[in-house]
């Protein structure tokens, strides 16, 4: 097990209301995990607490020593003073350069390498940003709407590639799309309103790999389960 | 530029024009109305008589209601008098002559200083500047553009001393170059800063003396009382009354019997200067203001003409202004 | 850009001059109060060469003073951008010191440094330094989370990179502040020359005012305006080149 959150209670600085109350969750196995919930329920906040970017909460998070947990989101930008290719090369450890080339091909970034980040489409921006995180040393990568602007086919291909290339890593995939998390994630943490208990319910997803056929009825059952849980 | 912007600019111009025009509106005082008297400098010993007239009822005794306003580097009494913002003012002869050269309609109704207080202080122990030739090889402070520059250049020309033989040094309010010995002669108002610096040097064990252009026959008239020709023509009684009141006030302020009163009065307006210094300043002022014949305020026409001649020779003015024509010896 | 700046200045200058002349002729004021057109023309022709050299002298000092101020403000803002004791002290000192009227401090500078170039440079630099510093501190203190986050979480963030990101992201603001402060540098130099120096157009202005010569003052103001406009245009062009080289969409102030 990589991560276990026990009795997490948190309110925003200077805020009165609780965001989390005695929240419990865990990431037991490597692979794609989903974090789903209505807008404003605190998905990004929980993700940043897990990544260690937010402190000042009550409760306990247990994780192995030296575990690297990175949080990425779709609003991040690359600096504008150099091209995307230069930037990616600069932030890639030497040992990961072959991986960089693979990801560039897999994520269809070849045409963007000579451009500045501001010149890319939203989908290209998301892919370039995700690429640089995948090149870092990590145990868990949180992808907060990281593929929000990528078209469905490419998104499917990217997720499949990630699953194939990083079978031993943990991913926490945050999305508003119930179909998406149901399809791609092995376990889905459904984050609910603070007044509900338990605040997180775990639902099994379909964890699709590549182009494997998906039983439509099973998928719909999963989706319904998630929606009911939320 | 769109029509709205043009309208805004036009409106702004109109407002500015209105404000400026109202500022330029000439005012002639009605009988019994307050008259404004603009001094040449800030309140100090050189305004003792003006303050005396105000505070000891001399103006009131002459049925005058006077607002005495301090001058300063940014104030020009001649402009204020011409613009009608003041009815009387104090200006030095060089200012008057410059203004006349530009067509200013002003007249001189009294000459306050009989001797020019603008002199040069020097260390008495180091050198003796008894004659102009002693200036050769010395560093002499002048205010470029100021009347001290005109006086010094005129003096050098009069005594055939090439400017190359005197090191002219640009001076400001900071006296450090004089204290440090970098400058040998420093221009000061003898009855004001002259006393203060002399005292400081004396405390440091150094004797000081003054280089007096008047004694070398370079006579440059200092503070005088001015008004406009229009005032003299339209309000002759008011002009007479003011002139008389002011001269009386100065006489009384400088009278030995009123010494204590005058010192206290000047100190009340100029609290940075200790009373013992004001006492010495008052004594020096008496010597510069009271003429030998006792006619306080008399206009020394010859000195005015020499001032004009110096300015003409120095190229400060381009053509004669015939200053004698604006000197109203008895204020009429 | 240049014709626009110059023409804007000329319109304002000649509007002002026209207003003065209108007042002069409306109220039959003497040339002493407001000089006539011929007087201004003759005086301008007479002093042009001398004033041109003086204004170039002033501009040179203003440019160097401005560069010094930019360099100093950059260094202090970098030191003061942190959310620590040093940063807090620098920010407090900057906010308090900028309230001091430099004109009041200038005579002390002249006493300490004399009336030569160092005093003029220092006063010019100080007058434009504080507005620059406050803007630079504001810009360099504000995190650009969307870019910095990656470097922070991957342990790559260094102070140089942080400064580079924040400066780059605010390049338009920085250029506006730098251009705006150029006028202050010019004003600072002129004030310094007016108060204590022995050269430059401020010194010439002081002499003209001593002599109550408004025509000379107007001639000096004309040259100051023209060269100030030229300096501003040069900075704007430089800003455009910098923005272009950095791959930022060039934007005029």
Image (tube, rainbow, N blue to C red):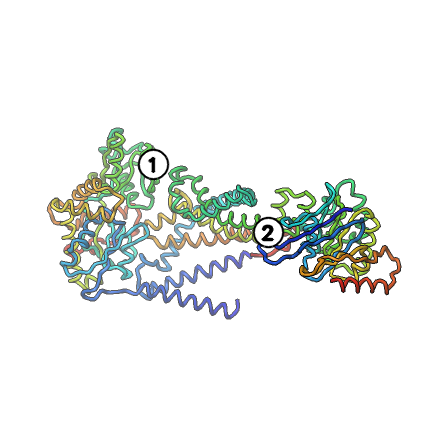
Q: Nearer the viewer, mark 1 or mark 2?
A: 2
Q: Mark 1 sits on what residue?
A: B176
Give the letter of the chain under mark 1.
B
- Distance of label 1 from label 2 (alpha carbons): 46 Å
Q: Is residue C224 left or right of residue A111?
A: left
* Other-residue count near label 1 (Cα within 10 Å), few / some / many at <14 / 14–19 / ≥20: some
Asked if A76 appears above or below B25 in the picture, the reply is above
Q: Secondary structure at mark 1?
A: helix
Q: Residue at x 62, y 55 (%)?
A: A11
Q: Residue at x 27, y 31 (%)?
A: B204
**Residue C15 x, y percent position in the rendering:** 43, 62
* Other-residue count near label 2 (Cα within 10 Å), few / some / many at <14 / 14–19 / ≥20: many
Q: Mark 2 sits on what residue?
A: C171
Depth check: give the residue in front, B56 or B194: B56
Q: Decide if residue A124 is in sight here.
A: no
Q: Which mark is residue C244?
A: none
Q: Is residue A132 left or right of residue B331?
A: right
Q: Is residue B265 left or right of residue C32?
A: left
Check if mark 1 and mark 2 are on a common chain: no
Q: Is residue C168 left or right of residue B207?
A: right
**Residue C85 x, y percent position in the rendering:** 53, 42
Give the letter of the chain under mark 2.
C
Residue reaching furthest to the right: A213
| Residue B25 lies in quadrant | bottom left
**Residue C39 x, y percent position in the rendering:** 36, 57
Q: Secondary structure at mark 2?
A: helix
Q: Residue at x 22, y 60 (%)?
A: B35
Depth check: give the residue in front, A118 or C180: A118
Q: Decide if residue B25 is in sight here.
A: yes
**Residue A93 x, y percent position in the rendering:** 75, 41
The quadrant of the image that shows the C terminus of chain B is: bottom left
């Amino acid at each position: 097990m990589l991560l276990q959150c026990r009795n997490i209670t948190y309110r925003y600085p200077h805020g009165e209301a609780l965001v989390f109350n005695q929240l419990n969750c865990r990431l037991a196995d490597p692979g794609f995990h989903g974090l789903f919930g209505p807008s404003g329920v605190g998905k990004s906040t929980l993700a940043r607490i897990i990544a260690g970017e937010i402190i000042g909460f009550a409760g306990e998070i247990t994780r192995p020593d030296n575990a690297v947990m990175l949080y990425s989101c779709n609003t991040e930008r690359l600096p504008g003073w150099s091209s995307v290719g230069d930037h990616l090369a600069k932030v890639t450890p030497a040992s990961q350069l072959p991986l960089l080339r693979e990801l560039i091909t897999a994520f269809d970034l070849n045409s963007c390498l000579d451009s500045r980040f501001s010149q890319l489409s939203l989908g290209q921006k998301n892919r370039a940003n995700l690429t640089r995180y995948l090149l870092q040393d990590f145990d868990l990568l949180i992808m907060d709407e990281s593929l929000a602007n990528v078209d469905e086919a490419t998104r499917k291909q990217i997720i499949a590639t990630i699953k194939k290339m990083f079978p031993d890593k943990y991913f926490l995939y945050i999305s508003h799309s119930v179909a998406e998390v149901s399809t791609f994630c092995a376990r889905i943490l459904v984050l609910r309103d603070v007044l509900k208990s338990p605040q997180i319910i775990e639902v099994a997803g379909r964890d699709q790999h590549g182009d494997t056929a998906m039983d439509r009825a099973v998928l719909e059952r999963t989706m319904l389960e998630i929606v009911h849980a939320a | 530029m769109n029509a709205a912007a043009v309208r805004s600019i036009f409106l702004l111009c109109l407002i500015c024009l209105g404000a400026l025009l109202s500022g330029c509106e000439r005012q002639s005082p009605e009988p019994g109305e307050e008259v404004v008297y603009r001094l040449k400098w800030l309140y100090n010993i050189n305004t003792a008589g003006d303050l005396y007239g105000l505070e000891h009822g001399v103006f009131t005794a002459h049925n005058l209601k006077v607002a005495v306003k301090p001058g300063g580097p940014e104030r020009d009494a001649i402009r204020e008098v011409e613009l009608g913002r003041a009815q009387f003012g104090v200006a030095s002869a060089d200012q008057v002559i410059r203004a006349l050269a530009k067509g200013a309609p002003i007249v001189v109704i009294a000459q306050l200083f009989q001797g020019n207080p603008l002199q040069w202080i020097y260390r008495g122990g180091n050198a003796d500047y008894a004659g102009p030739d002693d200036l050769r090889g010395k560093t002499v402070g002048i205010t470029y553009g100021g009347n001290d520059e005109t006086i010094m250049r005129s003096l050098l020309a009069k005594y055939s001393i090439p400017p190359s033989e005197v090191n002219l040094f640009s001076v400001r309010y900071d006296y450090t170059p004089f204290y440090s010995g970098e400058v040998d002669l420093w221009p000061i108002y003898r009855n004001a800063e002259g006393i203060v610096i002399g005292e400081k040097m004396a405390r440091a064990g150094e004797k000081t003396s003054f280089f007096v252009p008047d004694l070398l026959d370079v006579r440059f008239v200092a503070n005088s009382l001015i008004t406009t020709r229009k005032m003299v023509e339209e309000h002759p009684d008011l002009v007479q009354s003011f002139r008389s009141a002011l001269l009386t006030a100065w006489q009384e302020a400088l009278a030995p019997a009123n010494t204590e009163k005058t010192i206290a009065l000047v100190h009340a307006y100029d609290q940075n200067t200790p009373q013992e210094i004001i006492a010495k300043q008052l004594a020096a002022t008496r010597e510069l203001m009271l003429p030998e014949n006792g006619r306080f305020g008399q206009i020394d026409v010859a000195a005015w003409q020499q001032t004009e001649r110096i300015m003409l020779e120095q190229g400060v003015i381009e053509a004669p202004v015939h200053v004698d024509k604006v000197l109203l010896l008895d204020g009429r | 850009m240049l014709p626009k700046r110059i023409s804007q200045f000329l319109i304002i200058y000649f509007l002002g001059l026209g207003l003065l002349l209108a007042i002069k002729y409306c109220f039959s004021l003497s040339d002493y109060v407001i000089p006539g057109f011929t007087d201004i023309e003759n005086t301008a022709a007479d002093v042009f060469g001398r004033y041109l050299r003086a204004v170039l002298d002033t501009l040179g000092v203003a440019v160097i003073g401005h560069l010094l101020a930019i360099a100093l403000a950059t260094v202090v803002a970098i030191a003061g951008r942190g959310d620590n004791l040093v940063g807090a002290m620098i920010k407090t000192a900057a906010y308090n010191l900028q309230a001091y009227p430099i004109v009041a401090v200038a005579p002390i500078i002249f006493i300490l440094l004399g009336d030569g170039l160092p005093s003029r440079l220092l006063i010019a630099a100080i007058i434009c330094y504080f507005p620059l510093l406050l803007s630079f501190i504001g810009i360099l203190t504000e995190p650009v989370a969307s870019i910095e986050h990656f470097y922070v979480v991957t342990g790559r963030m260094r102070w140089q990179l942080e400064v580079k990101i924040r400066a780059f992201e605010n390049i338009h603001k920085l250029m506006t502040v730098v251009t705006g402060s150029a006028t202050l540098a010019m004003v600072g130099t002129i004030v310094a020359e007016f108060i204590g120096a022995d050269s430059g157009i401020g010194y010439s202005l002081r002499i003209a005012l001593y002599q109550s010569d408004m025509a000379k003052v107007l001639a000096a103001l004309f040259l100051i305006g023209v060269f100030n406009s030229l300096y501003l245009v040069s900075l704007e062009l430089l800003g455009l080149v910098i923005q272009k080289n950095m791959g930022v969409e060039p934007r005029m102030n």
